[in-house]
Amino acid sequence: MVTTKKSVRCTKPALEVLEERSLPSFLLSGALNQLAQPLNNMVADLNAAKTALTTEQTELVILELNGSAKISPVAQFFAQGAATYQQMLNDVHSIAATSTADLALIKTAAVAELMQGDPMDFLVLNLGPAFGIDVTTPLTTPVDQANTTLQSVQSIVNQTYLVTAEGKTINLPSIASQTTPPGQTHRFYI
């Protein structure tokens, strides 16, 4: 008896080279919504501060119209209004700074990927707006919302008050004059 060996023939498939393949843009996957979440939280805080400022201003107007107020509530509502407006200024500044930093990070990452041979994010970032695709909207919309909210309270913070309290007439300056935009120093005078 003669046995013959059958030769086994098989082939191994070639592995795909992943490094040379262009991957989809992370900008189109909604990844920026994660970066935008802190900005949206700051906008919510800003809107809560606007509500508080409106309440404090209403109380000051009521005391102004009352004509026989006590000094301590007048001082309390005025100080709370100034502190609330200062918080709003700080929030708007933080929103703008965070948005700017996030946009710079994204642009730097897109250029780095372009230099490594993957132009997708660079193209989406720079040419997308020409085709109606602005992936930076989640990072720029909170800045616009913050500026709109700050503008909406300008009549409140620029109002002055003439309050009669405990037989004395008190001329209160505007709340805006008692706050300092971030990055500036200010002396407070009442």
Image (tube, rainbow, N blue to C red):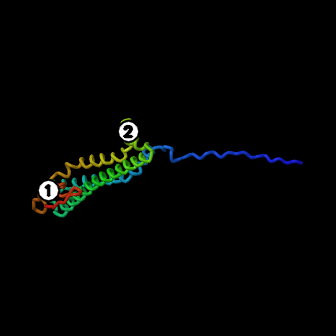
From the top left corner, tell me how far across and down residue 7 is, in percent: 76, 46
From the top left corner, tell me how far across and down residue 56 is, in percent: 23, 56
From the top left corner, tell me how far across and down residue 132 is, in percent: 38, 36
Judge by depth and name the residue closer to the eye, 58 or 39: 39
Q: Residue at left 67%, top 45%?
A: 11
- Mark with earlier residue (2, 1): 2
Q: Nearer the viewer, mark 2 or mark 1?
A: 2
From the top left corner, tell me how far across and down residue 96 is, in percent: 30, 51
Amino acid found under the numbered disc labelled 2: Leu
47 sits left or right of 65 in the view: right
31 sits left or right of 172 in the view: right
Where disc 1 sits, the SS reads: loop
Judge by depth and name the residue closer to the eye, 67 or 47: 47
Q: Which residue is mark 1?
A: 173
Where disc 2 sits, the SS reads: helix
Q: Which residue is mark 2?
A: 127
